[in-house]
Amino acid sequence: MKTQYYVASSLDGFIADRENRIDWLMEFGMEEFSADYAAFIENIGVIVMGSRTYEFLLGEGLAEWPYAGQMCWVLTSRELPRIEGADIRFARGDITDLHREWAAAARDLGKDIWIVGGGDVAAQVYDAGLLDELLITIMPVVLGAGAPLLPTAANSPVFEVVETHAFSGGALGATYRTRR
Amino acid sequence: MKTQYYVASSLDGFIADRENRIDWLMEFGMEEFSADYAAFIENIGVIVMGSRTYEFLLGEGLAEWPYAGQMCWVLTSRELPRIEGADIRFARGDITDLHREWAAAARDLGKDIWIVGGGDVAAQVYDAGLLDELLITIMPVVLGAGAPLLPTAANSPVFEVVETHAFSGGALGATYRTRR
């Protein structure tokens, strides 16, 4: 069971632009990444996201909930709308306690945990020493400012690189393992 | 004649940490990158840096000036110490006018221009439409905060990827060409 942060970033480390939008990402077209995503999501039993990521998905007017095969935890201190037919649990509290629940659920399923985002949620998990892997797709674009990839509290230890690959359109994919 | 920004960055887009230090970079050891650097610097006739980068180099107590083979422009509005035996010109003013001078000198030498940094100098060159290539070495480390890679004024157009390569220690190298 692994806890993974799978995310697309600009070259300069932003996951959303200064208006908190991802139009710049969508412009690349997602076809090229669909096999990579399919291989990834197949092993995911539990997903975790912050309230703003959840609200972003709500605002997208999705025809269907894209994570029907996963348990979804949304970290929030607010009341948020539910989505018909989606397995969503709203939660707040200590990240280590919460992670124990996510891990138990993922183990029961024989699958992994995906920290969807935003960066602040991933940073909380990272800072608590609970992140196993960072799977990043680095897009060939500079945003200059925006929502940071992983706003951790301190310089991190070095990551170990597990694997890297180049997409034909210029994106770079890399899997990093955190050192404990 | 090309104007290139050749730089090492953390995974999350910082070129120096929150204390403006590069210890995190030096920890990787530079041997692995020496061939890459040697191939790069061979084609550089003119280097350009901001005053803080210059002062950083001064503070390093270098046994010898590392850019003896290049003309060096330092962008500054302050009086700064000179270095014995180094070809250094202090300058201030409009970046497009200055770039005309750098380009003329580089062309005379049959070589290219290296924007050494910091990110703000590279961003000025980029925003003026004068940056041809970004040559980045992405180190397997997250800093969380620090000096940004390329703090441009606006979302940039997409870069074209010229070439990518993986270093054995986990760094990723990539050359990007700006689109005009």
Image: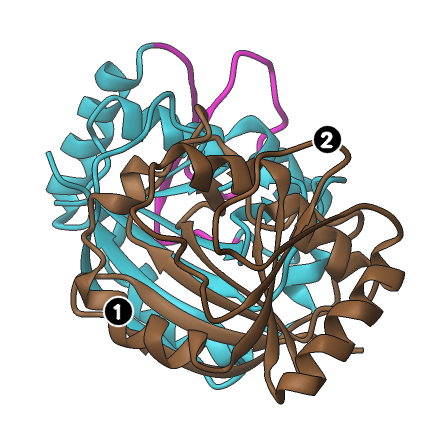
Chain colours: A cyan, B brown
The answer to whether residue B40 is above or below residue A3 is below
Q: Residue B132 bears which disc, if any?
A: none
Residue A84 visible in the displayed image: no
Q: Magenta stretch containing residue A134, yes or no?
A: no
Residue in front for this viewpoint, B154 or A67: B154
Kindly identify which chain the residue marked by label 2 belongs to. B
Q: Amino acid at mark 1?
A: Ser
Residue B22 falls left or right of residue A117: left
Q: Which residues are magenta?
A: A66-93
Q: Is residue A86 magenta?
A: yes
Q: Report the residue at 22% width, 61% height from top.
A: B170
Secondary structure type for disc 1:
helix
Residue A110 as seen in the image, left or right of residue A101: left
Residue B42 pos. (x, y %): 43, 80
**For the residues marked 1 and 2, what is the alpha-carbon distance in whole angstroms?**
33 Å
Q: Residue at x 79, y 66 (%)?
A: B99
Q: Which mark is residue B78?
A: 2
Tell me the quarter of the image containing the C terminus of chain A: top left
The percent coordinates of residue A82 (x first, y second) are 58, 31
Question: Badge 1 local density, few (<14 within 10 Å), some, or many (20+)?
Answer: few
The residue wearing badge 1 is B34
